[in-house]
Amino acid sequence: MTTRHVRSLGENGVALRERLIEAGLEPRLADILDSMPHRLVHVEPRRPFREAGVARDEVMFVRSGLLAKFKADSSGKRQIVALRFPGDGILPREGTTDYGVQAIVRSEVMVGKASDFDPLVDANPELARFFWKLVQRHNSIGYEWLVNTGRRDSTARVAHLLCETATRMNLDIDHESMVNPFTQQHIADITGQTSVNVNRVMAELERLGMIVRNGREIAFTDWNELRRLAQFQPDYLG
């Protein structure tokens, strides 16, 4: 029987420099960003870290944990519209933001000022190209999410999110289990359904033998079938 290790997004103690290099940034450029004036903030998931509708003259990089961008409708119901994994960033923008930011799990986030970040990018074209590629990647993920919530059935939506999360965590499917970072409500807010239906779908995926759950841990026991069900093609994450 294969021994499985467990992978969690809550791992801390990893320097931001290493996270950026893992994300594809050259070590020299990672050193430049790491030396930028910043503060390391521990973000709890119980309340929003940043509200919508305020000026966002800052840059954020996730060192550990998981951040979500969210929007709310007029009744206060939330839709999670994007995720930021370790090594991902939220870049400065002009004017006010139309989304809020909240941690999914306890997270470590580097927060710097746009006035320090922008000159570094202007002085290093390689940095600008790196962030442009990240913006394109996040756009591709956003398009895939639109298809997921708009065209796939409820089971495929959840299966696709599980596949994407495991892939973005660089999980070794054959030898590692994943600590599920999401509550059922998080999954509902990402996939556009109710938490009750998410509970049913997770039980169905387990009944079909595609996953095995042990508390928050998920082992992927039939990855190929899960991918087929989810119509998951990871090229958009490249």
Image: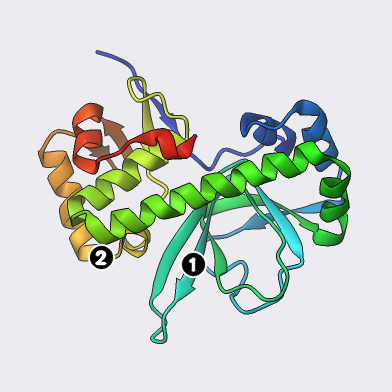
- In space, the residues marked 1 and 2 are separated at their CA atoms by 15 Å
**Residue 69 image offset from top left, x and y in percent:** 52, 62
For label 2, the crowd category at 10 Å Cα-Cα, with few meaning under 14, some 14 to 19 and many 20 or more, is some
- Residue 121 placement, left or right of 41: right
Query: Front-most of 139 and 199?
Result: 139
- Which residue position holds label 1? 70
Q: Is residue 39 above or below residue 206?
A: below
Q: Residue furthest top?
A: 1
Q: Quadrant of the N terminus?
A: top left
Query: Front-most of 121 and 206?
Result: 121
Q: Considering the numbered disc 1 on the image, is that residue within a helix, a strand or a loop?
A: strand
**Residue 93 image offset from top left, x and y in percent:** 70, 65
Please give the name of the residue rendered at 77% of the width and 36% of the height, measured from the top-left corner. 126
**Residue 128 image offset from top left, x and y in percent:** 75, 44
Q: Considering the numbered disc 2 on the image, is that residue within a helix, a strand or a loop?
A: loop
Q: Is residue 98 above or below residue 156?
A: below
Q: Amino acid at mark 1?
A: Phe
- Which residue position holds label 2? 193
Please give the name of the residue rendered at 16% of the width and 48% of the height, measured from the top-left corner. 203
User: Can the viewer see residue 229?
Assistant: yes
Mark identifier at residue 155: none
Query: Front-most of 46 and 85?
Result: 85
Please give the name of the residue rendered at 53% of the width and 43% of the height, measured from the top-left corner. 10
Q: Amino acid at mark 2?
A: Gln
- Residue 102 placement, left or right of 211: right
**Residue 103 image offset from top left, x and y in percent:** 54, 58
